[in-house]
Image (cartoon, helix red, strand yellow):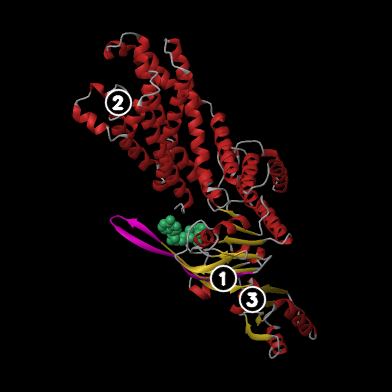
Amino acid sequence: MIETSGLRKSFRSREGRRTKTVDAVRGVDLKVAEGEIFGFLGPNGAGKTTTLRMLATLIEPDGGEATVAGVDLRKDPAEVRRRIGYVAQGGSTWDESTAREELVLHARMYGINKADAHRRAARALDAFQLTEYADRRCKTYSGGQRRRVEIALGIIHEPRIVFLDEPTTGLDPQSRAHMWDEIRRLRADGVTVFITTHYLEEADALCDRIAITDHGEVVAEGTPTELKREISGDVVLVGLDAAATPQAAQLLDGEPYVNKLETVDEGGLRLYVDEGATAIPQILRRLDTADLGLRSIELHRPSLDDVFLTKTGRSLRES
Amino acid sequence: MKFARDTWLIFQRQLHLLLRNPIWVFVGVFQPVMYLLLFAPLLKPALNAPTQAAAYKIFVPGLLVLLAIFGGLFQGFGLIAELRAGVIERSRVTPVSRLALLLGRSLRDVVSLIVQAVIITLLALLFDLRVALVDLLLAYLMLALIALMTSAVSYGIALKVKSEDALAPLMNTVAQPVLLLSGILLPLTFAPGWLQGVAEWNPFSWAVDGTRALFAGDLGDDRVWQGLGIIAVLAAAGVVWAARQFARSVR
Ligand SMILES: Nc1ncnc2c1ncn2[C@@H]1O[C@H](COP(=O)(O)OP(=O)(O)OP(=O)(O)O)[C@@H](O)[C@H]1O
Ligand SMILES: [Mg+2]
């Protein structure tokens, strides 16, 4: 659905008397399949918004190629616009108009007739739980309500692809969960969703595939599971009394699914396995052959932060 | 067809928002009315006009042109607020015509100017101003073209500078010489020769002369079609240039 190669963009900005060039995006290659939720994960200033704005025809790339929804971005930006929806990071509603007016206007800017635009607006208001505020001015909305209006605007014309720039920033956990449901529903309807986020949990829980970016480059790409597995597989912590630990170590050492085994000082084992979900039952069965007094068993998965850490040497949580 | 529809869509939206805030209508009429009531009485003696009505025939067209120029030039501020709110970017991702994004807004400005002009004309009628309907309509056409041009230029510049801080001094700098060199408040017939020579290069000076000729009932005066022609060409150029700013990437 989206394919880019070598997409580049630099900005010139004035700093005092000198002009400085910022390479915001330096050669991004992406492939987004139809009907998936693709996450663009990266710290502030990584170039996520700039990439999105290029793909949404808002700024022209300095170099590189891209096809969006089967259309060449450079050759026919107007056709790209017809096929996509875009929700900006910084908001897009007008204080003095109401959610309903904004939705109707936006639908009509896509060429939808008046009656249909009103129908769609009503449906969108309902889907995003906005009906209650629909005819109040946008300036009276809470941040989360406003964000929901903006997302609704981005999909009012039922595009094949929608770009969402940090859709859940500023939402409370409940609204975020609701937003995730909405995004999943879009996928169920066959829409390709391209979202940016700097929330690891969001990329992990919501996205089918992600690209991790830093300083304008993609440093890793794949499904969240693949990316994490690439790092180290899972860790299973087995809680045991110190006395029982050596025997347990003996039982599990050399089992094919255990990549590495460490004993924990206060008692217990740390097992490195490829996939915890399949390893744990086998570990339990194996330990069951002797009465060792198992206290706990825990699965630790490497997080996307670990992925980011290995690729860039920094933690995403810190940057 | 699509272009006309898009323009109408944007125009409706902008007009709707304007009417929602009626304070603007009030402000827009209040100032010129003050000019009419408080400044115009000084004119009869100053212009050495035979009657009050004759003084109004000179002053009212100038006042209307002044309104058209300033009303238009300061529209850019509203656009900067829209830029900041993300409304322009949101419009630019849709296939809506870029020319319509500009023209819808500028036409709203033209309409609000014409409403002001009508109110002022009606008031001036109370002071014995008399104008033939054809002349008046042609004068309104002139005003509409002026407002179209100045508001388009203002929008274009707003899209370029993107900040009120830059727009305000810029507009004042443009507006001041335009105002002084157009004989808007007092006809340049009183001006020394060199000043008249400079004013020849000011298109608004032609517009003011043309409008005055219309109010005086001289439909056949060359200045009428010359003024209309000059302003029409400039308005078209301003609209094309500003629409291009809408099409170009913002930021
Ligand atoms: N118009 C501009 N002029 C100058 N520099 C810019 C401009 N737009 C973006 N940049 C710079 O380009 C870089 C990438 O910015 P971008 O907005 O794409 O980051 P981002 O990944 O979206 O970050 P965030 O998570 O904070 O939204 C930053 O260093 C930013 O300062
Ligand atoms: Mg961003």
- Closer to the eye: label 3 or 2: 2
In the rendered structure, the answer to whether residue B118 lies left or right of residue B226 reads: right
- Under circle 3, the secondary element is helix
Which residues make up the magenta segment? A11-32
Instruction: Please name the residue that numbered disc 3 is placed on.
Output: A226
Q: Name the magenta segment's main secondary structure.
A: strand
Output the chain of dot 3. A
What's the mark number on residue B111? Answer: none
What's the mark number on residue A30? Answer: 1
Residue B168 in picture, x, y percent from top left: 36, 38
- Closer to the eye: label 1 or 3: 1
Query: Which of the marked residues, 1 or 3, is nearer the chain's N terminus?
Result: 1
Category of crowding for the residue at label 1, using alpha-carbon neighbours closer than 10 angstroms: few (below 14), some (14–19), many (at least 20): some
Task: Let me know if marks 3 and 2 both belong to one chain.
Answer: no
What residue sits 36% from the left and 43% below the top?
A: B166
- Quarter-of-image position of residue B36: top left
Category of crowding for the residue at label 2, using alpha-carbon neighbours closer than 10 angstroms: few (below 14), some (14–19), many (at least 20): many
Output the chain of dot 2. B
The verdict on residue B54 being magenta is no
Question: Which residue in the rendered view is the most extreme toward the top?
Answer: B51
Query: A272 and A202: which one is in front?
Result: A202
Quadrant where the N terminus of chain A sits is: bottom right
Q: How far apart are marks 1 and 2 (CA)?
A: 62 Å
| Looking at the image, residue B195 lies above or below residue B157 | above
Instruction: Please name the residue that numbered disc 2 is placed on.
Output: B183
Q: How many marks?
A: 3
- Under circle 2, the secondary element is loop
Q: Is residue A44 visible?
A: no
- The amino acid beneath tag 3 is Glu
